Amino acid sequence: MFWSSLIEVFDNFAFDEVIALSKLDTKTRVILILASIIGSQAVSEYRVMVAAALNVGVTSVEIKEILYQSVPYVGMAKAFDFVHATNEVMSLLVIQLPCAVCLLPSLVSLTFIEIAQSLHQFHGLRMS
């Protein structure tokens, strides 16, 4: 059958040849795969890979950050489907995310840069 042979070729390439030749650790490779899937707008595959990413040590905050970083490249309208997909997977897996909106009362008097720095600090990220 065509589909089974195509899947076999894909599996051999993606899960044998690429991994055998890769210098990247699994977590980094999966992060790059998530970003690529967002760029190619493959929402169904993204749902599968979010669960796989969590299994190899990518945190829920890192997954959200990958998604946030995609917005300037794919646009908010396209990224929004992935926001929903991410939230669906996280809900199914009963994963709680930190709520950035919870920080807003303490951020009211701050400048945009100070708010951005606070949010990055909240998520454990460094601003360059």
Image (cartoon, rainbow, N blue to C red):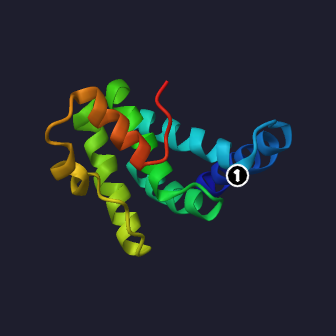
**Residue 112 in view (yes/no):** yes
Image coordinates of residue 57 in percent, x first then y, are 63, 59
Question: As drawn, is 54 to the left or to the right of 68?
Answer: right
Residue shown at 56% from the left, 61% from the top: 54
Q: Count the marks: how many?
A: 1
Image coordinates of residue 43 in percent, x first then y, are 39, 49
Q: Residues within 10 Å of mark 1 (few under 14, many from 20)?
A: few
Name the one closer to the observer, 71 or 22.
71
Amino acid type at circle 1 is Asp
Query: What residue occupies the far right of the structure in this picture?
Result: 20
Q: Is residue 65 above or below residue 8?
A: above
Name the one closer to the observer, 57 or 39.
57
Residue shown at 50% from the left, 49% from the top: 62
Name the one closer to the observer, 44 or 4.
44
Residue shown at 77% from the left, 40% from the top: 18
Question: As drawn, is 79 to the left or to the right of 19?
Answer: left
* Helix, strand or loop status at disc 1: helix
Residue to which mark 1 is pinned:
11
Instruction: Choose top left, top right, bottom left or bottom right for residue 110.
Output: top left
Residue shown at 44% from the left, 73% from the top: 93
Image coordinates of residue 7 in percent, x first then y, are 64, 53
**Residue 42 in view (yes/no):** no
Q: Quadrant of the N terminus?
A: bottom right
Question: As drawn, is 42 to the left or to the right of 18?
Answer: left
Image coordinates of residue 103 in percent, x first then y, are 25, 52
